[in-house]
Structures are given as structure tokens and as C-alpha cells.
Image (cartoon, coloured by chain):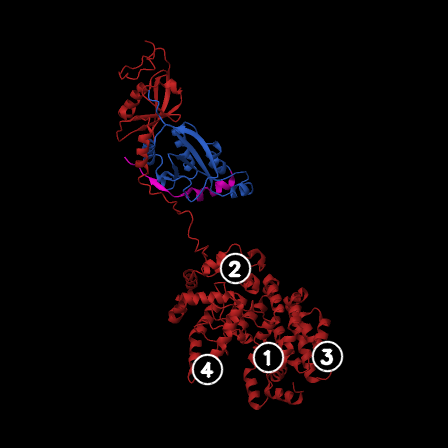
Amino acid sequence: MSQSTSSFPVKLYIYDLSRGMARQLSPVMLGRQLDGIWHTGVVVHGQEFFFGGAGINYCPPSGTMLGDPDSVVELGSTEVNEELFMEYLGSLAESEYSGDKYNVFEHNCNTFSNDVAQFLTGRKIPSYITNLPSEILSTPFGQALRPLLDSMAINPGGNNINGQR
Amino acid sequence: MAEQGAADPGNNNNNKPEASEGTIIKVTVKTPKDKEEIAIAEDASVTQFKEEISKRFKAKQDQLVLIFAGKILKDGDSLSQHGIKDGLTVHLVIKTAHKASDGGSTSASSSASTQAGSSSTSSPAANPASTTGPTGSGPAPTQAPNIMSGFGDLASLAGLGMGSANFMELQQQMQRQLMSNPEMLSQIMENPLVQNMMSNPDLMRQMIMANPQMQQLMERNPEISHMLNNPELMRQTMELARNPAMMQEMMRNQDRALSNLESIPGGYNALRRMYTDIQEPMFSAAREQFGSNPFSALGGNSESGAQPSRTENREPLPNPWGPPNSSNPSESGGGTTGSTSTSGTTNPSVSNPLGVNPGSLGNGMFNSPGMQSLLQQISENPQLMQNMLSAPYMRSMMQSLAQNPELASQVMMNNPLFAGNPQLQEQFRAQLPIFLQQMQNPEALSVMTNPRAMQALMQIQQGLQTLQTEAPGLMPSLMTGGIPGVPTGGAVPTENPASSPSSAATNPAQQQLMQQMLQMFAGGGGSATSQTPEVRFQTQLDQLNAMGFINREANLQALIATGGDINAAIERLLGSQPS
């Protein structure tokens, strides 16, 4: 029984892409209160991993142009070591999370963070984040903007992970 | 045996769990690529689980790494140990490279793999990626002709009140409104967005070149394209546009230079040539473009540039009955116009590409074909007049004029009506503020918009004029009081004290001015065909001049009174009081 499994902390970095504007303007524009437009990245093994229009990216924590996160959630810890994790990400990048699979509503950075968090820790990320797209789409405004938003991709930068098979 | 021992590390046999007692649970095994449901005994070991998985996923057991709840499932563990129950999901990574170490990593290997993992990262710089576009270009106006259309935060179009559905017109109006309000203009110039845009000579050039007339112009005159392509020049011009004082300074230098130039033998010709080559096409460019808009037609006369935001426009709007102003149909709102006059010699030079000559703004306004067409339009369309007057920018223009009598007077001085009569100019200048006030009086405005009222006024005017020539001594004061008050139709009495000091000598000219204006508005009575009397009687005037009657005003008046009959006019002149 090898109990020398180490444990790596896993954190979720949450960014508000609207920089506070959503909190202020959403009641007016959308008709419901949204506290932010959330972008997330998973920080583990000393790197921040996130999914954007260019695919899976990683960078040092808080290293994207978004700067420091608005909030950080401890997801727990994982035994998955870095090598394994990178391999996992590589497979993801080849399949589910290649760049062209990005969809700002259905399959976005938060979807990725959610999957990775579950992989690493078995826990999901807070639901207010994953519920965001449906909240937006449930407003007429969101519906109206949908075609526009669909064509957008959020790309905070970083290095790309490609499938390394 | 009912149960396979949980602690059975070396058990690699392929015995399937009998599962006679353990219930079968369905566990979802998820890889990055896919997902399978695997039925396994609840009490199975990880090894057994992996066996199943290897069959299903067609991979070697060694390659499988199972993760659940953040923990890596080791072969010796059992599923229940980890809490894996029916319906839960276990993650699987199928390793390609084959590593001896199980999922459980020691710190040593983790550091090794850290290196591997981060080898490609040379500190991933936070690459400011595509999300932020270039800010330099700003909201590049989609409609090339009008720089102001790009600025959404500017004066709300709704306030223009022109009632015009034509967006182009609206734009032009907005431009004019801008021009009419110097503070607004400077505010806009302060706007960092604008500055940003303007400091980008490429953008400016692009906008300017987008105008087809400009393009034609440039084809004909390569010098112009040189001018545009010279960033220094553009920048300088933009500086000028921002700084009125500097502008004036430049104008003065310009004028001086020009007068020097004129004195050089052959210089005058050069100037003239320059003028015809460049100014005219620019005029016509400006005019064509805005043919439908009365203001622009008006302005087109005394304007030289359709676009380039070179030199600042001094006058907000052409005021057809007031001091001749040049409008600004320019494309790029930052500054604009060149103005030239038909008789002026303001020509483009290096420092003043469009030959702005503020001194001659509005010169010959009344004579221009533009003016005439404007008047025609006005007379045909009283509604237009109404709109024109009620437009807010009109008000503000008048206000600014009122506040800046010097400017207005400067303009007035060049009005041919007043040419040669400094007294009159003085007079008018003194009265200008009041005059402008009058113009702002809404009652006055409503009178203006009523063609019949205007016609009546004009008749009164004519009557008074006749009266004056016939019996000049009869009621000078009445007339002085009446004349300025008449066109406004409003506060007649207030005019009296202000204008009574004016000598009788200035009356005829004033009357004439007023009369002409009224004539224009009323669409002309009998013979007036929206041509000023001056124009109509040009030949006669010349003849009178040749004969020695040098008082132009008096000549004109006489001609008007006699309807162009020279002989009768001469008699009038000889018999009337010298004015």
C-alpha cells in the first residue's frame, strides 16, 4: 500500500470579465442580477490552466492579462501528479477541449474548469459559475445577443496545450 | 470465497469476481475522450476494475490510471474503499508513455515531471491577446465622409431638431452644431479618443481620401496628395484646429505672405493660377456634395475644402440674412474649411493648405450661385426656413455670434454691400449685437418663416425706402427706428434708441441690406428672382460708376427704385440727397 501519494492543492481562480460592470448593469440590461461574467482557471501544480478560444492554455497563476482573480475557491487536493495531469490535459485537448470546440455559452472556460476540477478532486466548481450561460440566455437580451456572443471567444492568453499523442 | 480480500496487493489473477454476494454496480469510467459504463462488483478491487476497463478500452492495465475524488486508485485498493458506488464517475487516464510509477507520485518524480511539464513554458507571458483590439483606430467611422458620425458620445442627434430623416444631413448638422459652439469643439478636441484618432495621420488621411470629390481633386492636383501625405503637415493642421489663437496667428502670417507674394512680378498670376487650380475644384466639390442642403450650398461658396480638417472654421453657419458666415460642410469635423472668396486671394500655401482666409469669409456671399440657390430653396419651401430657424444650432450660432461681435464684424466688413463704406460698417458693427439679439427672438423667427409676412415687410421696406429717397428729410428717425426693427418684426421700439444715433447716411445702405434680405425671404416680389439687386443691376452699376457716381449704395438704391432704368436712376441720384 503505497501511501506516499502526495497531495497537491487545487484551486479555482475566478475572474470577473466585466470588472464589476455586470454587477451594476445587469439588472438594467438583463433584468436579472448577475454578479459578474465569470471566467475561471484551475490552479494546480503551480500553473493556471484554462480553456479559451485557442484551446487549453496554461500560465503562471494570475499570469493572464486578467491579472489577479476576483476570488479563489479551494477545491481540495488531488493525488494526480503533474505528469499524469498533463497527459490528461493532452487527451482532453485532442478531444473535448480542442480550440475549435470553444463555445462561449455551452463549452467554455467554466465547462473546462468544471471537468478538470472533477477529475482532480471529484468536486465541481460552484454552480453560480456554471449556471451563468443559462442565466444569460434566459433573458431576452441574452437571446438577442446570442449570435454575436457565439462568435466570440475569450482568450486571455497563455501557452497552448496540444494533444501530445 | 465470498469476498476477495481487499488487501490483496498481488492478486493479479484473472478471476472474475463471482459477484455472488457483492452487488453489481455500474460505474461510469470517463476518459478525456470518452465514457463507458462498466458493471462491476461493489466490492471489487481496483485491479479487477482495471481489468474490466482494459478490456473495454482496449488498453493495457499498466496504462490505466484511475482517479476518483482526486485520488488515484491503486491496484491494491478496493472500490468501496474509495467510496465508489453505483452511478458515480471515475476518471481514467490512459497513459501513452509508459511509466513505471503508478499514479501515486513521489515528490521526486513530481519534480521531474514538473520539469517536463513546464519545459515548454518559458514563463508564458500574459500575452495580451486578441481580445483587446487596437485602440489607436478608435471607432473608425464607418461612414467615411463624416468623422463625427463615429463618435457616439457626441451631441445627440435627437437634439438637432431639423426634422430631417436623412442621416447624412443629420451628420452635417451635427457637424455644424459642433462648429457653432466653440466650446463644444474644444471639448471634443480634448476628448482623448478624438485626439487619438487625430494623432493618427493614417486614419485621417484615409478618411479624407474616402471622399470621392477629394479623390478627384487629388488626381488633378498631385500637390494636394502630397499635402495629405505629409504627416507633419497634418499634425500641424490638427494643432491649428485645436487652437484658435494659433489659427489666427497663422492667418495673419498667411495674409502678409500673400500680399508680399502679390507684389512680386508674376506673383499675382501664380496666385491666381493656384487659386483656380485648387480652390475652384474644391469649391465645386464642396458644393456638389451638399447641393441639397441649403447651408452647404451657401457655405460652399465661401469654402474651399470639402474635407480636410485643416484649418479651423470660424463661422458656425451661414446666416443668410445676417453676417455672412461660411458653413462647414467638411467631412472631418476637427477643424475645417478653407475659405476663399471669389475676390480674395487666399491661396493654399504650405502652412495653410486650404487657403483659409478668415478675413474674407463670406465674401461675396450674396452674389454666389450658392446663395441664390439657397434663397430659391428657401422661398420655395417655407418649411425649410422654419426648420432652419428652429434648429438649435442656429440659436447657438447666433449666440456665439452675438458674443463675438468682433468676429461677426470682421465678416461683415467683407461683405460687398458694405464695401467702401466704413461708416456703414461701423454702424453695423455697433448694431450687430442687437441685431443678433433680434434674430434670436422667437417671435422674430416666426415672422421670418412666414413668407407672406416677409413679403409684407418687404413692401413696407420698399415703401419706406421710396419715402426716404423722395423726401429724405421727412422722417429720418422713424426710419432708423423702423428699419432694423422691421425684419425682426418684434421689438421695434427697442431698436430706436440704439439706432437713432445712426446717421441718415447709413440708412439707405441698411435699408437696402434689409430689403434685400427680405426680398430673398419672401421669394421676391415682382422682379426679384432671388438674385440680389446688386447682381441684377451689375451692368448698370458699372455704368453708373463709369459715369462718376461712385457711391455704390446710392446707385444701387436708385437702380432698385427705378427698376434698373439707368436714366431714371441718374436723375434720382442727382436729385436725391447724397448718401
Q: Nearer the viewer, mark 3 or mark 2?
A: 2
Respond whether the residues carrying marks 3 and 2 are from the same subunit: yes
Report how far apart the C-alphas of labels 1 and 2 lie in the structure: 38 Å
Cβ–Cβ under 8 Å for marks 3 and 2: no
Question: Which residue position holds label 2?
Answer: B190
Q: Residue B453: say if magenta.
A: no
Which is more N-terminal, label 4 or label 1?
4
Report how far apart the C-alphas of labels 1 and 4 lie in the structure: 25 Å
Chain B, which colour?
red
**Which residue does the image show at 59% across and 79% down from the upper left?**
B417
Which is more N-terminal, label 1 or label 3?
1
Question: Which residue position holds label 4?
Answer: B262
**How many marks on residues?**
4
Q: Secondary structure at mark 4?
A: helix
* In the displayed structure image, the side of residue A122 where residue B457 appears, left or right: right
Q: Which residues are magenta?
A: A139-165
Report how far apart the C-alphas of labels 3 and 1 lie in the structure: 22 Å
Which chain is represented by blue in the image?
A
Which is more N-terminal, label 4 or label 3?
4
Q: Nearer the viewer, residue B350 or B521?
A: B350
Respond whether the residues carrying marks 1 and 2 are from the same subunit: yes
Question: Which residue position holds label 3?
Answer: B477
Residue B200 location, x and y as percent?
A: 43, 60
Report how far apart the C-alphas of labels 4 and 2 lie in the structure: 38 Å
